[in-house]
Image: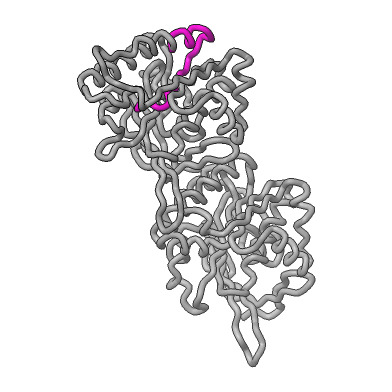
Amino acid sequence: MTMVKNNSLPKTPSGVSGLDEITTGGFPKGRPVLICGSAGCGKTLFAMQFLVKGITEYNEPGVFMSFEESASDLGKNVRSLGFDLEQLKSENKLRIDHVHIERSEIEETGEYDLEGLFIRLGYAIDAIGAKRVVLDTIESLFIGMDNLSILRSEIRRLFRFLKDKGVTAVITGERGENSLTRQGLEEYVSDCVILLDFRVIDQIATRRLRVVKYRGSTHGTNEYPFIIDESGISVIPVTSLKLDYESPTDVISYGLSDLDSLFTLNGLYRGSSTLITGTAGTSKTILASYFAMASYKRNEPVLYFSFEESPEQLLRNMDSIGLNLRPAVEAGLLHIHASRPSLQGLEMHLLLLHKLMSELRPKTVIIDPISSLITIGSSSEVRGMLVRLMDTLKTNQINALFTSLTHNNDNVHSDPTVDAVSSLADNWINVRNENRKGTRERSLLVVKARGMGHFNGKKEFAISNKGFKFKEDNL
């Protein structure tokens, strides 16, 4: 997704990875932002990350005013994300104020107002020169109130107070049954409204974010998955990129001289994507491992996604054919991430891949096999995810290799995953096993290679304890 920056509205970085791209720069500076959603969707963590990152990365002190959790409870809850609130408080960069509200004692009498809160909040802001403020959660202020006109008036006055103080404020609110919030009022007086959602589909949990409204600024309008892990919240804009990436002309070795010789340029274009298809036992993972070894020999980092084998199993199996990948792992140039596809949804796998690519900066990415993804999504959903992934890989000129398990030697196009991906890949290699007089014969065919000529006949090969080797006679 490519967006045009809107420079007319000053922005404050959100501190949440990926969100600033969706909002073309961050939150509206000096204005209130409403974060709403149901219980457990991550509102408080979202707001706390906004404060902590503002302090640590942008030197903007912040105030967190909580109406539900105490300061000690908040500190414990976010410590797992690496947020040391006590340290920030000792440096006089963070103020946490817990306003205790006893619901059973609340009674609306006379003219209800928030004047006492304004004084308390204003003092905290002035004491540390705060630039960011969080109010978590706003519903607690109005429990027991029946007069909606007063409620509307006080909310407007609260937002006006925050604007007058010149702070960028994040206000969290619980999702209502028929509106974004329980009162259904806050969204009418907020400059920016973000909805968080936590849903479970087919026993797979996914968190999603949507920018409902953003006054004076362009923004992404889709739903975007986000994850919460040990480093905080990450949002990845996952809509497809434009077809405007560069196409390198330099050639890299596949890692097998026999295989390189099948291409007229004696290798593959750097930054291209290669699909290897075949039925079970046709050496797809072996060919993928040779590709990883070639990247290691070029001193280029490799990210290997394995959906069927653990890292140790993969290393052991490759050792048996004389392909020792352990030095690459020990050198930190080969990172093997192994998990079952059913661990999370399609978009969450894409988010994790983006996150690992950002951390490891690989030059080669291998996914073995992509056909496993069909168990957690339809063919169209898998294709949509892989389109976005391939766009990202090509934009960053990353060498990509995907393996896919097929169930029919004679008509690989009938396989839903191959049908979804084959047209996207730059190179397509099909491997197969055939029984001939009680002997299994392995063969390989280059189906296509964009931008270069290639050998268009089948080649028989063998796998031994010395690795991959073409047979002398062509088929």
Residue at horizontal 55 percent and vertical 29 percent from the top: 73
Residue at horizontal 68 percent and vertical 61 percent from the top: 289
Total marks shown come to: 0
Residue farthest along the bottom direction in this orientation: 437
Give how far across and how far down residue 327 sits, in percent: 79, 53
Quarter of the image holding residue 122? top left
Give how far across and how far down residue 32 sits, in percent: 37, 20
Question: Can residue 465 be spotted in the picture?
Answer: yes
**Residue toward you, 114 or 190:** 114
Q: Is residue 23 above or below residue 111?
A: below
Give how far across and how far down residue 240 sits, in percent: 42, 46
Position of residue 198 in the picture relative to residue 434 (left or right): left
Q: Is residue 367 above or below residue 123?
A: below
- The boundaries of the magenta stretch are 121-139
**Residue toward you, 102 or 53:** 102
Give how far across and how far down residue 319 sits, in percent: 77, 65
Residue at horizontal 26 percent and vertical 27 percent from the top: 185
Quadrant (top left/top right/bottom left/bottom right) for the N terminus: top left
Quadrant (top left/top right/bottom left/bottom right) for the C terminus: bottom right
Quarter of the image holding residue 446? bottom right
Q: Is residue 440 above or below residue 421?
A: below
**Residue toward you, 73 or 460:** 73
Position of residue 135 in the picture relative to residue 312 (left or right): left
